[in-house]
């Protein structure tokens, strides 16, 4: 079983709190997971976020989930995505200093996916995993063709039409879960399998 370890680091807006999932084998990568919109109750304890962190740890990665600025015991206030990019950069730097410069995976859910897409422009991760990105609500840049995008067919927050409008010009594949909503109620096992199988088929 992966080991959980709390961490607290200094970000540009103050303290950032988080939890590291340490694999029970020699780590092969570092995965940083970002949570959904803080103003609607999003935290690092979100079930999609914890599912991703556990899946990455099971794949032999050091997985870090954390609270954005203004959430839980993290200092500062919501910054509509701009400051949250700095939060991810701080957590990624901490992870690389603590555990070495292993291949980097960036993952996020909803608002967190939009933040990670922006972070990827700076950090150039080995892999990018975007779960139900809140396209249409927040700035969403183009992403590498190797990006794993998973979306629910009946997403009530980020409609499929918005996702396809964003993905189509990039010729970007999207994995669609039929009848799934934004929060993947009752479908987390499928989400876990999709992410797991994606990394089994891709070298780090």
Image (cartoon, rainbow, N blue to C red):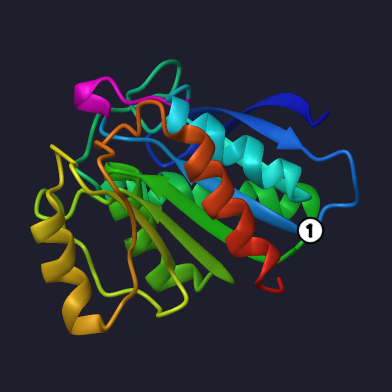
Residue nearer the viewer, 94 or 5: 5
Based on the displayed image, in which of its 4 quarters is residue 186 positioned? top left
Image-based side of 86 in relation to 204, left or right? left
Q: Quadrant of the N terminus?
A: top right
Q: Quadrant of the C terminus?
A: bottom right
Picture residue at 25% right of the left edge, 41% below the top:
179
Residue nearest the observer in this picture, 85 or 128: 128
Q: Which residues are magenta?
A: 38-44
In the displayed structure, 122 sits above or below 169; it is above
Q: Is residue 105 above or below residue 8?
A: below
The spot of residue 100 in percent (x, y) is: 79, 58
Residue 29 appears in the rendering: yes
Position above or below: 38 against 81: above
Q: Residues within 10 Å of mark 1 (few under 14, many from 20)?
A: few
Q: Residue furthest top?
A: 72
**Left or right for 120, reference 112:** right
The reply to whether the magenta stretch includes residue 63 is no
Q: Is residue 72 above or below residue 109?
A: above
Q: Is residue 98 left or right of residue 190?
A: right
| Residue for point 32% across, 24% down | 70
Q: Which residue is mark 1?
A: 100
Residue visible at 42% across and 25% down? 46
- Where's residue 77, x and y in %? 26, 28
Where residue 99 sits in the image (x, y, percent)? Answer: 79, 51
- Residue 92 visible to the viewer: no
* x, y percent for residue 128: 48, 64
For the residue pair 63 and 97, the one nearer the viewer reads as 63
Q: Which type of secondary structure does the marked residue at label 1 adopt?
A: loop
Relative to the observer, which residue lies in front, 97 or 61? 61
């Amino acid at each position: 079983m992966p080991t959980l370890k709390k961490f607290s680091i200094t970000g540009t807006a103050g303290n950032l709190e988080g939890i590291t999932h340490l694999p029970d084998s020699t780590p092969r990568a570092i995965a940083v997971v970002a949570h959904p919109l803080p103003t609607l109750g999003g935290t690092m304890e979100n079930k999609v976020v914890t599912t991703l962190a556990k899946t990455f740890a099971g794949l032999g990665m050091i997985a870090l989930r954390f609270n954005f600025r203004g959430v839980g015991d993290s200092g500062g206030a919501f910054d509509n995505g701009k400051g949250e990019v700095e939060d991810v950069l701080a957590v990624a730097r901490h992870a690389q200093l603590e555990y070495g410069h292993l291949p980097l995976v960036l993952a996020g859910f909803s608002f967190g996916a939009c933040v990670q897409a922006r972070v990827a422009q700076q950090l150039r991760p080995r892999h990018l995993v975007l779960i139900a990105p809140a396209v249409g609500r927040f700035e969403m840049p183009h992403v590498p063709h190797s990006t794993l995008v998973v979306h629910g067919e009946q997403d009530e927050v980020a409609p499929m039409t918005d996702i396809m409008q964003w993905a189509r010009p990039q010729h970007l594949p999207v994995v669609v879960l039929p009848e799934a909503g934004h929060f993947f109620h009752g479908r987390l096992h499928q989400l876990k399998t999709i992410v797991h199988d994606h990394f089994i088929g891709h070298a780090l």
